[in-house]
Image: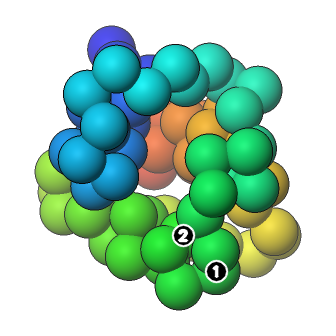
Amino acid sequence: MVLEKVVEILRNYKDEQHLEVTMDSTFEELELDSLDTVELVMEIEEAFDTSIEMDGELTTIGDVVELIEKAIA
């Protein structure tokens, strides 16, 4: 469920409804720079009504999904 919601948010953010996204998709592959990543994480936090601790560097969609799953557990 978390992955599906994150993918939906990402597709809306990029305005590309057919964008292929997996847990292993990197922000670089998705052509997201650091500002895009911060904005995307903020949208994801709002959608899940939580806060993500960004201690390490986020490089994949899977990294974001794991942080969300921990935050809402």
Point out residue 33 in the picture as x, y percentages from the top left corner.
64, 74
Point out residue 44 in the picture as x, y percentages from the top left corner.
31, 55
* Residue ID at (28%, 55%): 13
* Residue 70 appears in view: no
Up-down: is 53 above or below 20?
Answer: below
Question: In the image, which disc is placed on residue 34?
Answer: 1
Cβ atoms under marks 1 and 2 closer than 8 Å: yes
In the image, taking residue 16 as reference, residue 12 lies left or right, namely left
Please tell me whether mark 2 sits on a helix, a strand or a loop. helix
* Residue ID at (75%, 56%): 28
Q: Name the residue under label 2.
A: 37
Up-down: is 3 above or below 33?
Answer: above
**Mark 1 Cα shell of 10 Å, populated few (<14), some (14-19), many (≥20):** few
Front residue (pair 46, 29): 29
* Residue 67 appears in view: yes
Name the kind of residue labelled 1 in the image: Ser
Name the kind of residue labelled 2 in the image: Thr
- What is the tally of numbered marks visible in this picture? 2
Could you give the CA–CA distance between mark 1 and mark 2, rounded to whole angstroms? 5 Å
* Residue ID at (48%, 74%): 36
**Mark 2 Cα shell of 10 Å, populated few (<14), some (14-19), many (≥20):** some
In the image, taking residue 36 as reference, residue 32 lies left or right, namely right
Point out residue 55 in the picture as x, y percentages from the top left corner.
75, 75
Quarter placement of the C terminus = top left
Point out residue 59 in the picture as x, y percentages from the top left corner.
78, 54
Quarter placement of the N terminus = top left
Question: In the image, which disc is placed on residue 68?
Answer: none
Please tell me whether mark 1 sits on a helix, a strand or a loop. helix
Front residue (pair 72, 62): 62
* Residue ID at (52%, 20%): 20
Up-down: is 35 above or below 8?
Answer: below
